[in-house]
Image: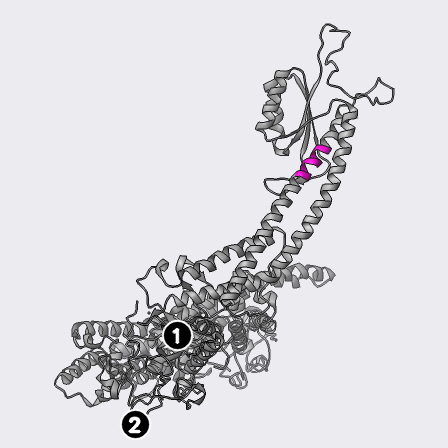
Amino acid sequence: MGSTSGRGCGRRGVKLSGAGGGTAAWVGGLRGTGGPHISGLPFGGEPRGRPAVRSGSALPTRTGAVSRCRCLLPAAGPFLGEEEVRSPAGPAPCPGPAAAHPAGCPGTSGVPPSPPGAAMGSLFRSEEVCLAQLFLHSASAYSCVSELGERGLLEFRDLNPHVSAFQRRFVGEVRRCEEMEKTFTFLQQELRGAGRELGPCPENPPAPLAREALRVQEQSEQLARELREVSRNRAALRGHLRDLRQYLHVLREGQRLTSLPGPPGSPPSTRAFSEHDPLLDPSVHQHLDRKINFVTGVIHPWRVSAFERLLWRACRGYLVASFVEMPEPLEDPDTGESVTWVIFLISYWGEQIGQKIRKISDCFHCQVYPYPESEASRAETLNGLLSQIQDLSVVLEETEQYLAQVLDKVVLALPTWRVQVQKMKAIYLVLNQCSLDVTEKCLIAEVWCPVRDLTQVQDALRQGSYKSGSSVECFVQRIPTMESPPTLIRTNKFTAGFQSIVDAYGVASYQEVNPAPYAIITFPFIFAIMFGDVGHGLLMFLFALWMVLYENSPSLRQASNEIWQTFFEGRYLILLMGAFSIYTGFIYNECFSKATVIFPSAWSVATMANRSSWSSDYLATHPSLTLDPNITGVFQGPYPFGIDPIWSLATNHLNFLNSFKMKMSVVLGIVHMGFGVLLGVFNHVHFQQRHRLVLELLPEVVFLLALFGYLVFLIFYKWIKFGAADSRVAPSILIHFIDMFLFTSNADNLPLYEGQVPVQMVLVVLALASVPVLLLGTPLYLCCRRRRRKTGHPPPVAAAEQEPLLEGQEAGNSVNATKEDVESGGHGPDAEHMDFSEVFMHQAIHTIEYCLGCISNTASYLRLWALSLAHAQLSEVLWTMVMRNGFVRLSYVGGVVLVPVFAVFAVLTVAILLVMEGLSAFLHALRLHWVEFQNKFYVGAGYKLCPFAFVPDSWE
């Protein structure tokens, strides 16, 4: 595919774990039984063991020696793909500098091309992936891995699986990155506390070099120190200002509460209470010399009730407490929220009571303020508070401005810093997976790489070496392996949704046939069979079309709702499901459960009335009338497209539609399964297992077609032979199919054609004879072939399968495999000791599963009929019970009633028929593809290629 999104290879990024446990963020009419019965006349409308490769040792080549460049490391020269630069006289050193190298030398800019076959990326089969080694000079390893991460081409393997994360080479660098990430987290928390959001990275910055990383660390720590200091000063200023404002309000409210009223009828007195004023009237108790004391402060509003009760009980009522809310809300120092504090003023007599009040106030975390005795002192204190508040507000405003400037710097720099540090950390985590050569000057990495991208890999290594300023280039070299490579299927935004459906069942094995391209058509079509309705399909189509047209909108792509993301990522799938539902809706002739008249009906009611004995008395006693197709002119032939709309008026329309949809489900199911069996041909041919074509595929096809293919033949034969006029004498296919297995015949059920019984007996015998072939063929063939191999005389059919994968110099290497070894699972010499009983047991399970599966899977496709019927009936019930009530009244009142009725109908249509029924049909279509279709040819035992890539989505 031209454009790639990486969904076929996981998420084109790899999640790496390294030192400290950190991670780096990185997939017309049909025949019925008789005519329609009409009510009324009117009618309308993969630790893997890596091959030991020593620095300075040349790997074996395929047919000749590979020319090497000694300007590089003393290791073997690379060969990219299957075409090498060969020298008949053996290795020849390249004497010149890099600019003078001939094309094809690994030390030059010319890279040997990949094989032509490897340049094809196909959705039908995973790409060719090879195991390769990267030789990275220590001075340029960081830049090379950075360049590879920008391109996202390779999946790195861990060559140090038994080394602890804290004992690896670059653990110090990883820890430094984690420390910077902690600093970034603090900066982001400060931004959120200030109500500011951190935007996405405006560009894709490269991974920082050592000097740049040190600069980022210093600047970020400097900003963090400034923020801590400014935040600490601001908090202190805010707390001091809050205390001053509370004290100000306490004095003002205390002044108001302690003022005394004058005699009745006189103006209010301005004299205030004093601590030396007696509590009792001197004329009554002149011998008592006592004074009033006050305790003032503020308390949290939800503590007032308990505070007041405890004061009353502890002091036994020897006090007067007044509570009033503060005129303005102030910040709570514990939560940061605005709280309307409560001011209290408590007047008491006696020092012991005063001590109790102060202790209780401390228990309730009250802020107690001194209360001046005289009015002049209070006025002086008020003026001083106002002056302090004004000065402190100016200082706090300047502090806020300076803090905003620091936050502006953070907003500008932090997104870029985060991306750079994430890339740097990911690079060091990858470098921790590499091993050192004996000279400790070169890092060796093993990677899985698509063959078609080897040229890009070499170019990325060259670019990385150039950026690092190293004079020694790094290079890539393919190595042989017995392991199964990972699966890489490139997708785009259209095919990604269908590929994810297949991958949810199991990732395709390496080079296995991919069911996704076929599911692009079959999945929405099977869904539409169960969801066929023009109206509902149109609504689904328009919804998906809106998502497709506005797919680049940030509000749609970056929505955080998980359910919405599921719909949005499957927008093209929903689009096709809606389009196919419109098509099947026209076939069923249903639009919100009502039939439409596109073409004139093929049934003529007028002709039936004119040429029959329908009289007024007959019509009065027969509310249901039957149209007889044997009367000339009543039935004029099949409807041009879909179901004749007259069936929507017939009382026997369910019988007709059930028969049609049931047979259609069986036919489509057998065709779908047969197509899955035939796709196995491509797997057998590609993996050169030609014996399976004869010993497995052929008996499977015979078994399926002899029984169920014959059933499809009977259905079409009956549709063609019997029409509406002679449908009553048509024999039953079900009885014929039962008699076929019982080798009997039924005199009451006429044969469909001459010689039907002998043909059916032959088909049953063929089906039964294919079972032992399927059961014993492959085990006996493998046993015979291995015996012939031990005697040195391989059978002719197996000659091609025993061709060695490596030739020439490589043939003498101990790591060599034949195609048979690959077929047997890549176990090498251990595969020679084949246990016949194990192979037989595996084949027996496959045979039983296939034979029984053909029967059960065919029955499973009847869900197409059942869900289609349920959807149609539910649509009809919703129309009858809801929407039709809006058409009862014909006056203006009917128009008013129609509005809420339509609103209820629309909500129920979307909620029940579109969402619930759509989800049900989607799950059943998913089951039919995963089980009934894919189990005929698809193993799905692979694992995705997860390239090391810098994924921008993970930075936002």
- Work out whether residue 254 can be spotted: yes
Decide if residue 870 is on the left or right side of residue 52: right
Q: Is residue 482 left or right of residue 170?
A: left
Of 284 and 43, nearer the camera is: 284
Q: Residue furthest bottom?
A: 88
Q: Tell me: residue 331, above or below residue 701.
A: above
Q: Quadrant of the C terminus?
A: bottom right
Disc 2 + disc 1, Cβ < 8 Å: no
Q: Residue at x 78, y 29 (%)?
A: 380
CA distance separating discs 2 and 1: 29 Å
Above-or-below relation of 256 to 758: above
Helix, strand or loop for disc 2: loop
Q: Amino acid at mark 2?
A: Pro
Which disc number belongs to residue 88?
Answer: 2
Picture coordinates of residue 141, whole percent (x, y): 42, 72
Residue under label 1, please give it: 136
The mark nearer the N terminus, 2 or 1, is 2
* Left or right placement of residue 864 versus residue 412 in this view: left
Given the image, on which type of amino acid does mark 1 rest?
Answer: Leu
User: Based on the displayed image, in which of its 4 quarters is residue 486 positioned?
Assistant: bottom left
Residue 246 located within the stretch drawn in magenta: yes
Q: Which residues are magenta?
A: 240-248
Q: Left or right of 685: which side holds 885?
A: right
Establish if 765 lies above or below 439: below
Which residue does the image show at 33% across and 59% down from the upper left? Answer: 164
Residue at the top extreme?
Answer: 287
